[in-house]
Image (cartoon, grey):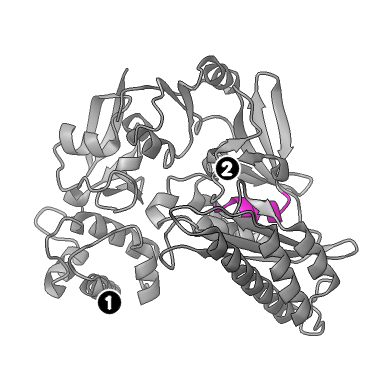
Amino acid sequence: LQPFDYIIPKNMEEASALLAAGNGSVRALQGGTDLIIRIRGGFIRPETVVDLKGLPGMREIRTSPDGWLMIGAACTMNQVGLHPTVCERYDVLAAGANSVASYQLRNRATVGGNLCNSSPAADTAPALLCLDAVVEVYGADGARRIPIAEFFTGPGRNAMQRGEFLTSIHLPPPAGPSHGVYNKLGRTKIGDISMVSVAVNCRAGATGPVWRIAIGAAGPTPLRAVEAEAALAQDPSPEGVARAADLTSAAARPIDDIRGSAAYRRAMVRVLARRGIESVLAALQAATPASPAGGLA
Amino acid sequence: MNHRIHLTVNGEQYDIDVPSHYTLLRVLREQLVLTGVKNGCEAGECGACAVLMNGEPVNSCMVLAPEADGAVITTIEGLAHDQLLDPLQEAFIASGATQCGFCTPGILVNARALLDRNPDPSDAEIREALVGNLCRCTGYIRIIDAIKMAARQNREVVR
């Protein structure tokens, strides 16, 4: 590796000041599984690396008094993917976290780092879009919250300003049963980066089931398929599922690149969406056999 | 910039000075001369550099040395106790699970962690646990056989 200085900041203020001072020469470090590869490849040459993991709350998962789940930004993929509350109430996020690379990499890779790297293929992003997560960042003006849908602004880009860093991810309490799946296509069955992925989630809402469908690696950012969600809420019949899969595919904005063509990605979005919706419907029916329409209403 | 870090490696205590940009892999191989830890891809893909850090497997090429301050590390050199090999090592020998041997230390370390958290893994669980360990010789079949053999022997000893 190119030489750089490694600094553990004493507190949030110092971390923010350090990150603000450099003009691209200071980098935030969480798990390092993206950062170290980019330094090694010569894509970035930081003079200073600021390790944020030890700051207060960064490695904690806890439920707040109002029922929201707070996940510290430096929690590892294994910490998140194996956490009982995440597995029980936010299973789509557990699936996303557990789909990342290998077990030993998931001991280092963090959910916050995954979001800050802002790859369109970030495996926790579609799940967090489905769960209407809110992220909290800290900067010179203190803490502020950003809905996950507004966080990603382009490939490798996000809504954080200079000097800001991600501190936590907040998940709203589900009003009732919630179930989701994450379908991911790579070169291998498990362990590879997503060529395309689709997360599907259904949860009980005040006026009926709330569907969420989000797409990874088939657009400049992770994307919601809002029209598909609305169509599915109207009509969860087999025809409605096929239509929602078509609408999900239409919502994708894929490009041709080394991992796949835009046309292939768009076609696979349709397949992964249909499979995802079908497995969520099947799980809902298994949970509530009396309600053939999918259950949560 | 240098950092004074404290490490416990295979039961031995070390206080060493490490530059900021050194990885744990480099410190283990070059400063502590534990060359059983292999340098493969340096990208977190191949698992040849896997070690146990506080009981959990990590790719040591993906850990900065100063991040490891205070950690308890086990490398392949620490898997055997005195002259007694780990049951996994015995099983790898008995099964012919090694050919060139470059991937073997990382696989053994990762398999040890697997059996520590799941003493009776299925084939699928073994395959999933080893997704981050690439072997270009064996085709993996005998590696999986060896891990199952070690797990079975361990259960028989416990019984």
Q: What range of the chain is rendered magenta?
A: A123-132
Say above or below: A9 vs B31.
above
Residue at image point 36% right, 62% down: B131
Instruction: Say the numbered circle drawn on residue B152.
Output: 1
> Quick one: which residue is furthest to the right in this view?
A207
Estimate the x, y position of residue B150 in percent, counting from the top left: 24, 71
- Whether B16 is among the magenta residues is no
Estimate the x, y position of residue B42 in percent, counting from the top left: 29, 43
At label 2, counting other C-alpha atoms closer than 10 Å, the crowd grade (few under 14, some 14-19, many 20 or more) is many
Viewer-nearest residue: A276 or B153:
A276
Q: Is B145 placed left or right of A282 in the picture?
A: left
Q: What amino acid is labelled 1 in the image?
A: Arg
Q: What amino acid is labelled 2 in the image?
A: Leu
State which quadrant residue A229 falls in. Answer: bottom right
Residue at image point 31% right, 23% down: A3
State which quadrant residue B14 falls in. Answer: top left
> Quick one: which residue is furthest to the left in this view?
B83
Q: Main secondary structure of the magenta part?
A: helix
State which quadrant residue A72 falls in. Answer: top right
Residue ID for mark 2: A115
Q: The disc numbered 1 marks a residue on which chain?
A: B
Viewer-nearest residue: A148 or A50:
A148
Helix, strand or loop under label 2: helix
- Whether A130 is among the magenta residues is yes
**Label 2 to label 1: alpha-carbon separation:** 41 Å
